[in-house]
Image (cartoon, grey):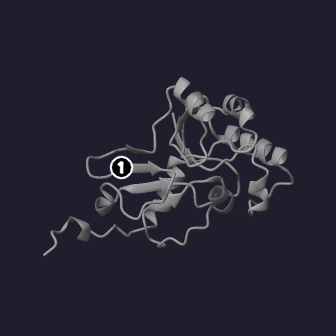
Amino acid sequence: MNTWFTADTHFGHAKILEYGRKGFTSVNDMDQKMIEGWNSVVRPEDEVWHLGDFCLGQKHRAPEYFYALAGIKRLILGNHCNQQTIDLFKTSGGYYGELHTISGKKKNGIVLCHYALEVWRNSQYGAWNLHGHSHDNLNTRPNAKRLDVGIDAAIRLLGSPRPFAFDEVRSIMQTRNELSSTDHHKAKP
């Protein structure tokens, strides 16, 4: 089993193309290429963490998109997640609210949130923050252990509208050495 991360698919959302999403001729072309990209790498037994904004626009088509995608799908709530989408993920046992941490060792792990965080649990020890929402437009510190795993970032970094593999995320994070300041742990005078 492999673990994958994505966000901001915005299935069915024609306006996302007007906002600058590149490489698609229409909303149907975008939807089809994202499904193909996802299914080209994700196997049925793989786990995929979707960090919000799954479907927007043609919300009635959310079940169609959901069932067309391979893998065990988990949802972190985004600002454009409607009740139908939440219910789809809940039914499959994959709804986790607004913030969730998956860990390896006691003092690290991966904090999943739709939004980019400045500091997060155990960031001072090297924990990562994976997020979406910024559509690859966030001016982030280049060495921060934070990564936008949304579709727009995937197009730029991976060359394809597909989820990021855990190993791809790890490879990117290994190039980043900045730990968040521990000043927030010090008592104020």
Give the residue drawn at x 57%, y 56%. 133
Q: In the image as oriented, which residue stretches furthest toward the right?
A: 25
Q: Looking at the rendering, which quadrant does residue 11 occupy?
A: top right
Please tell me whether residue 10 is drawn above or below residue 74 in the rendered image: below
Q: In the image as oriented, which residue stretches furthest toward the left?
A: 189
Q: Looking at the rendering, which quadrant does residue 62 occupy?
A: top right
Q: Position of residue 140 (x, y in %)?
A: 50, 70
Q: Residues within 10 Å of mark 1 (few under 14, many from 20)?
A: some
Please tell me whether residue 66 is drawn above or below residue 29 in the rendered image: above
Give the camera-side residue of 74 and 161: 74
Give the residue drawn at x 40%, y 65%. 118
Give the camera-side residue of 83 and 7: 83
The amino acid beneath tag 1 is Gly
- Position of 6 with respect to 143 (left or right) is right
Q: Position of residue 143 (x, y in %)?
A: 44, 71
- Position of 81 with respect to 60 (left or right) is left
Residue with the mark numbered 1: 109
Give the residue drawn at x 50%, y 56%. 115
User: The C terminus lies in which quarter of the figure?
Assistant: bottom left
Q: Position of residue 23 (x, y in %)?
A: 80, 58
Instruction: Label 1: state its secondary structure.
Output: loop
- Position of 151 with respect to 99 (left or right) is right
Give the camera-side residue of 25 and 159: 25
- Position of 60 with respect to 109 (left or right) is right
Please tell me whether residue 73 is drawn above or below residue 27 in the rendered image: above
